[in-house]
Image (tube, helix red, strand yellow):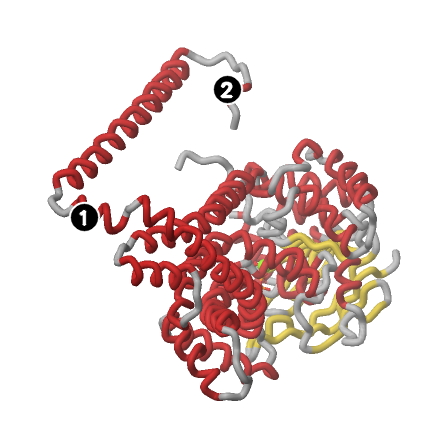
Amino acid sequence: MKEKDLDFEVSPIEQERQAYRKRQGRRSILISIASTFVLAGAIAATLHFAPGWPRVQETFFSAHYFAKSFPLVLDGLWLNVRVLIYSLIGTAIFGTLLAVVRISKSPVLFPLRALALAYTTIMRGIPMLVVLYIVGFGIPGLGLFGRIPIEILGTVAVTMSYSAYIAEVLRAGFQDVSPQQRASARSIGLSSGQTVRLVIIPQALRKIAPALMNDFIAMQKDVGLISTLGAIDAVRAAQVQVALTFNFTPYIVASVLFILMSVPFIILNDWYTAKLRKREQTGGMV
Amino acid sequence: MEQVVLKIDNVVKRFGENTVLDHVSFDVHKHETVAILGASGSGKSTLMKCVNLLEQVSDGQIWLSGTDITDPRIDSDEIRARIGIVFQHFNLFSHMSVLNNVTLAARKVFKWDRDRAEARAMELLKRIGMDQKAKEYPDRLSGGQQQRVAIVRALMMDPELLLLDEITSALDPLLVGEVLEMVEEIKSQGATILMATHEMHFAHGAADRVVLLRNGKIAEIGTPEEVMDNSTDPETQAFFRILKE
Ligand SMILES: Nc1ncnc2c1ncn2[C@@H]1O[C@H](COP(=O)(O)OP(=O)(O)OP(=O)(O)O)[C@@H](O)[C@H]1O
Ligand SMILES: [Mg+2]
């Protein structure tokens, strides 16, 4: 709580304790600043004395190639962003459906439940890249749908793969809400739909928000794999530049852009979990 | 005699092979407090859940103010909304403030507007001295405060019947008193209460009648004096003697 705002008379012992904590706090800030400088210095020195460093610097961190490839890679990134957004929507829908089927108890749904179990188990075992190949080259190979844009194939593959992960996270979250909370909700007269909407989902989401966000950030990264289907996304654009110039800086450009893309969500996630923790937990020492 | 609010009529409840309630029958009248006593596992909670339609009876009937609530054609959500229940623990919704917990049913089931629901909730919370905590989340309350809020939530819509299932058994002994005091007060205001409890003193003082369950059957039924003090049945005597020690 905000002890400092409240002007309580405190005993000398508490004054001493507060002073000590303050000193400790200042000391740890100083130590962390110092150690940061030492580490940065060590890295800089190592690179400076490494015989190959000038060449590495020129090949990976060239300002010239950075500026030159940036617009092209950024252009490619736009494709990644689109695929990411579509996949996100697709995963939210398909993943929730899978989770609901997995949780259901109705005997009628048994075959679906078995299918969903098989699907999530298999999909989580196959590397994303393989899913991409199967969908990206397999579906057009069937020749049923004419020419399918790579954007759509990529979206389907990412959605198929990530729905399996998300479904399992959702399922765990739903099942983690204690049965008494459901009983409580039903006992005050809420219908089963209202119980799910007003009690189960909000409580489950709180618990799984960090896991969901993790999957989302991983998904953001994996969207870069659509380059293997030949789409000109950020990775592919960088690859083309590298092939033309024999300089690897465009890969760094692509990496920087991917990192930048994920930063807002990482911040959002940290902020959200911190908010929940602050609101719902009695402040403790550990 | 006053009007019958709850009529339990030959209720049987089985879980698989295990018969937990075996032809149980008794009534609860308006303004009456009935305590169900019995060893752990004797079926007290199961009976409460059957009354609140959280469990289905295997046989027999339960009537609430003249309606057969075991009839599968009735609207069970509507029946549940007419009965208030407080469980042993995990009553309150952890993701909602005290105020939202108390007003949820009014807003979502009875479709009151928020102002009306909150005005009523604040009035009830004030009566138990918890209006200061209306914006707090349940985790920040003591166990006793949580249970008192849960009782307020159960009372919010003036239920015909209040079910209390061992509402103090998860509490620190120091907090038991404040919760039981509140139950006494509700009783004095004329509520109809069916409660399961291990607090023998409280049952003796607060209940108009007690029902003693043993192996799923009613072993004794009567006033607290008749059942708890003056029973001639050796098993009943043994049960209360062990508890008194
Ligand atoms: N959902 C269930 N499935 C199977 N058996 C159950 C279920 N719920 C309760 N039982 C069984 O029914 C019996 C009675 O349980 P109940 O919870 O009604 O006892 P109780 O009298 O409330 O005990 P306590 O005083 O410990 O709360 C127990 O033997 C228990 O194992
Ligand atoms: Mg019980």
Q: Tell me residue A69's x, y (percent).
A: 38, 53
Above or below: residue B48 compared with residue A112 = above
Q: Are marks 2 and 1 in contact (CB under 8 Å)?
A: no
Q: Disc 2: which chain?
A: A
Amino acid on which disc 2 is placed = Lys
Q: Where is residue A227 in the image (x, y as percent from the top left)?
A: 40, 67
Q: Ligand 1 appears in which quadrant? A: bottom right
Q: Which residue is drawn at 70% across and 55% down?
A: B85
Asked if residue B213 can be seen in this view, the reply is yes
Q: Could you say which disc has been placed on residue A4 in the image?
A: 2
Circle 2 SS class: helix
Residue highlighted by disc 1: A55
Question: Can you see residue A164?
Answer: no
Q: Which of A90 and A246 is in front in this view?
A: A246
Q: Which residue is drawn at 43% across and 56% down?
A: A72
Mark 2 surroundings: few (<14), some (14-19) or many (≥20) residues within 10 A = few
| Residue A122: image location, x then y, percent | 41, 77
Above or below, comparing residue A219 to residue B151 in the picture: below
- Give me the C-alpha separation between circle 2 and circle 1: 56 Å
Residue in view at x 52 percent, y 15 percent: A8
What x and y, as percent, mark residue B7? 79, 66
Looking at the image, residue A208 sits to the left or right of residue A69; the answer is right
Give neighbour class at mark 1: few <14, some 14-19, many 20+ (Cα, 10 Å): few
Q: Nearer the viewer, mark 2 or mark 1?
A: 1
Task: Say which residue appears at 20% left-offset and 49% top-offset.
Answer: A56
